[in-house]
Image (tube, grey):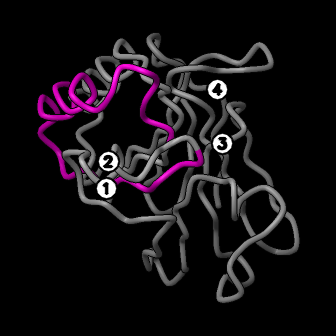
């Protein structure tokens, strides 16, 4: 399986267009969106762009996603997060405001991983035996980082810059 993972669009419609272009090049089995989809423009502009992406979409709720808007997204809704079993490991996908950089669900163990956004700066690290992959921000990067997204194939996590597609970091998990 190949996953394209992105977070923190904050209503940036150009970032959704870049996500579509990246997906057409990468051909993921699944796209996982990790929250913070909107700004003040509402759900319609976001759904207009999501409808143009012809890959399975799963979406978790971010801390800036009001329930009425989140529940109207045109994607598979996963609330605050979800698990996938990938190559014998438990992988947790979440926004990052509850679990992420400093904490993980109790059922996550040695060599499992948490993928999250929220912090707007990409990083891949391992602490307490758990891999932590912050996919950065597709729509509102911080700290001098590029707008970015992550590709995970079950073994390698690689973060790419939007729109150049340049690899920022690649790590074997």
Majority secondary structure of the magenta segment? loop
Q: Position of residue 84 (x, y in %)?
A: 43, 75
Point out which mark residue 173 bears: none
75 in relation to 41, above or below: below
Whichever of labels 4 and 3 marks the residue nearer the N terminus, that label is 3
Q: Quadrant of the C terminus?
A: bottom right
Whichever of labels 3 and 2 marks the residue nearer the N terminus, that label is 2
* 2 and 1 marks in contact (CB < 8 Å): yes
State the residue in front, 34 or 62. 62
Residue 45 counted in the magenta span: yes
Circle 4 sits in a helix, a strand or a loop, which is it? Answer: strand
Tell us which disc is closer to us: 4 or 3: 3
Circle 4 residues within 10 Å: few <14, some 14–19, many ≥20:
some
State the residue in front, 40 or 115. 40
Q: CA distance from mark 4 to mark 3?
A: 18 Å
Q: Quadrant of residue 5?
A: top left
Name the residue located 58 percent from the left edge and 29 percent from the top edge. 137
Q: Quadrant of residue 126?
A: bottom right
Tell us which disc is closer to us: 4 or 1: 1
| Magenta stretch, residue numbers | 36-63
Which residue is the site of mark 2? 31
Tell us which disc is closer to us: 2 or 1: 1
Point out which mark residue 118 bears: 3
Which residue is the site of mark 4? 168
Circle 1 sits in a helix, a strand or a loop, which is it? Answer: strand
Circle 2 residues within 10 Å: few <14, some 14–19, many ≥20:
many
Whichever of labels 4 and 2 marks the residue nearer the N terminus, that label is 2
Q: CA distance from mark 1 to mark 3?
A: 17 Å
């Amino acid at each position: 399986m190949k996953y394209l993972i992105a977070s923190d669009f904050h209503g940036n419609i150009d970032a959704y267009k870049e996500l579509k272009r990246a997906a057409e090049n990468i051909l993921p089995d699944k796209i996982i969106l990790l929250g913070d989809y909107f700004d003040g423009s509402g759900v319609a502009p976001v759904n207009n762009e999501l409808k143009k992406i012809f890959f399975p979409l799963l979406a978790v709720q971010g801390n800036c996603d009001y329930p009425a808007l989140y529940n109207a997204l045109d994607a598979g809704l996963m609330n605050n997060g979800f698990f996938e079993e990938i190559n014998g490991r438990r992988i947790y996908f979440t926004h990052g405001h509850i679990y992420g950089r400093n904490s993980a669900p109790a059922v996550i163990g040695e060599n499992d991983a948490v993928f999250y956004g929220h912090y707007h700066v990409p990083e891949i690290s391992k602490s307490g035996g758990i891999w932590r992959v912050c996919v950065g921000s597709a729509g509102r990067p911080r700290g001098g980082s590029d707008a970015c997204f992550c590709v995970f194939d079950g073994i390698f996590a690689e973060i790419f810059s939007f729109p150049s597609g340049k690899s920022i970091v690649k790590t074997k998990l």
